[in-house]
Image (tube, rainbow, N blue to C red):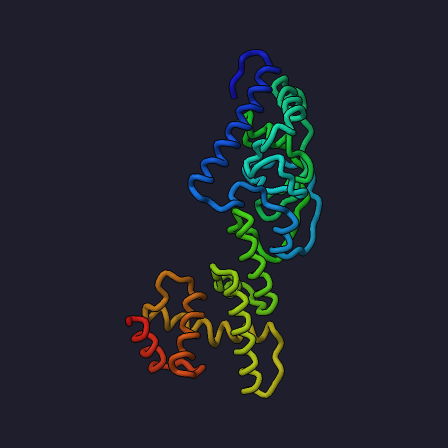
């Protein structure tokens, strides 16, 4: 933060510097051919919808890290992901807050929603932008904590929400719990839908074999313990996982098994056929 001794002039320079950085950042993203959403705030409603809303509670005034603020409730376009102004429209109010901050005046706390370790602004976009421009690392905030079915880990950009949304739907169809829930991970969101159908078909065959109805939780647990874990262990021993996740390797080999041998069973013959096919 530069300081000429003239707070008003410094506040004006703060805004122009923040605008220049925003333009340069946008240009750099274009030159690197990064996705369009790389510099856009995460929309709170879409994040919560993807993760699955459970409930919320107000926890009061807290000091939060500025870098933990990644999105907004109103999806305003006046600021980018780093809360740099995207136009001159906010200049007057922005410079007024910057001037107050430089004069040491008290700036009211912002209001945020907390989802995991992430924060989303309800009120206070300009204050956060000024705080970033002045080189601060924390800010006072009234926090409301929102609980969701899935954790927000792995969310960086808006495009990441697609994976979370499909994963949430998969876990509603296949309600895995504990370590099983964490183990089954796919990178392609559409594969969650395919795996969900696969598990449901496996469960249907299981119910036919046993002549009894099983609920989704029971099917999910039986599939994970009797089908998924043994198959993944065989794939690991046969060195057939490669650079996939274990769930991706399972889906690949299950499809190949049926394509090559037309069977749902697992034995040494199946594994050897799959290994030979993989080498070719």
> Residue 268 placed where, x, y %?
34, 81
Instruction: Count all numbered tags in the image, as a single digit.
Output: 0
> Residue 255 placed where, x, y %?
43, 74
> Residue 221 placed where, x, y %?
54, 72
Establish if 8 lies above or below 224: above
Front-lying residue, 256 or 77: 77
Task: Say which residue appears at 64% left-offset and 47% top-offset.
Answer: 44
Splitting the image into 4 quarters, where does residue 123 fall? top right
Splitting the image into 4 quarters, where does residue 264 fall? bottom left
> Residue 8 placed where, x, y %?
62, 15
**Quadrant the C terminus occupies:** bottom left
Establish if 94 lies above or below 194: above
Extreme residue toward the top, this view: 5
Splitting the image into 4 quarters, where does residue 171 fall? bottom right
Task: Say which residue appears at 36% left-offset and 60% top-offset.
Answer: 243
Task: Say which residue appears at 65% left-offset and 35% top-offset.
Answer: 141
Q: Is 30 displayed left or right of 87 in the figure?
A: left
Task: Say which residue appears at 42% left-offset and 65% top-offset.
Answer: 246
């Amino acid at each position: 933060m530069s300081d000429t001794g003239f707070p008003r002039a410094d506040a004006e320079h703060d805004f122009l510097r923040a605008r220049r950085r925003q333009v340069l950042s946008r240009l750099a993203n274009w030159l690197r051919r990064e996705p369009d959403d790389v510099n856009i705030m995460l929309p709170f409603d879409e994040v919560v919808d993807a993760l699955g809303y459970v409930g919320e509670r107000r926890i009061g005034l807290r000091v939060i890290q500025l870098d933990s603020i990644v999105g907004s409730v109103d999806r305003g376009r006046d600021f980018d992901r780093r809360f740099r102004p995207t136009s001159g429209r906010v200049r007057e109010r922005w410079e007024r807050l910057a001037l107050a901050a430089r004069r040491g005046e008290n700036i009211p706390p912002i209001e945020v929603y907390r989802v995991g370790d992430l924060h989303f602004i309800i009120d206070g976009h300009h204050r956060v932008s000024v705080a970033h421009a002045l080189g601060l690392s924390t800010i006072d905030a009234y926090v409301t904590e929102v609980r969701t079915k899935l954790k927000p880990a792995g969310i960086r950009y808006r495009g990441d929400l697609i994976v979370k949304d499909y994963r949430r739907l998969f876990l509603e169809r296949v309600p895995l719990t504990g370590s099983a829930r964490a183990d089954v991970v796919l990178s392609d969101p559409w594969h969650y839908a395919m795996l969900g159908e696969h598990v449901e078909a496996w469960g249907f065959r299981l119910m036919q074999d046993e002549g009894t109805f099983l609920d989704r939780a029971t099917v999910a647990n039986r599939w994970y313990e009797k089908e998924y874990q043994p198959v993944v262990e065989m794939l690991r021993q046969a060195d057939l996982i490669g650079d996939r996740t274990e769930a991706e390797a399972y889906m690949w080999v299950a499809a190949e098994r049926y394509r090559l041998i037309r069977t749902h069973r697992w034995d040494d013959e199946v594994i050897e056929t799959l290994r030979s096919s993989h080498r070719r």
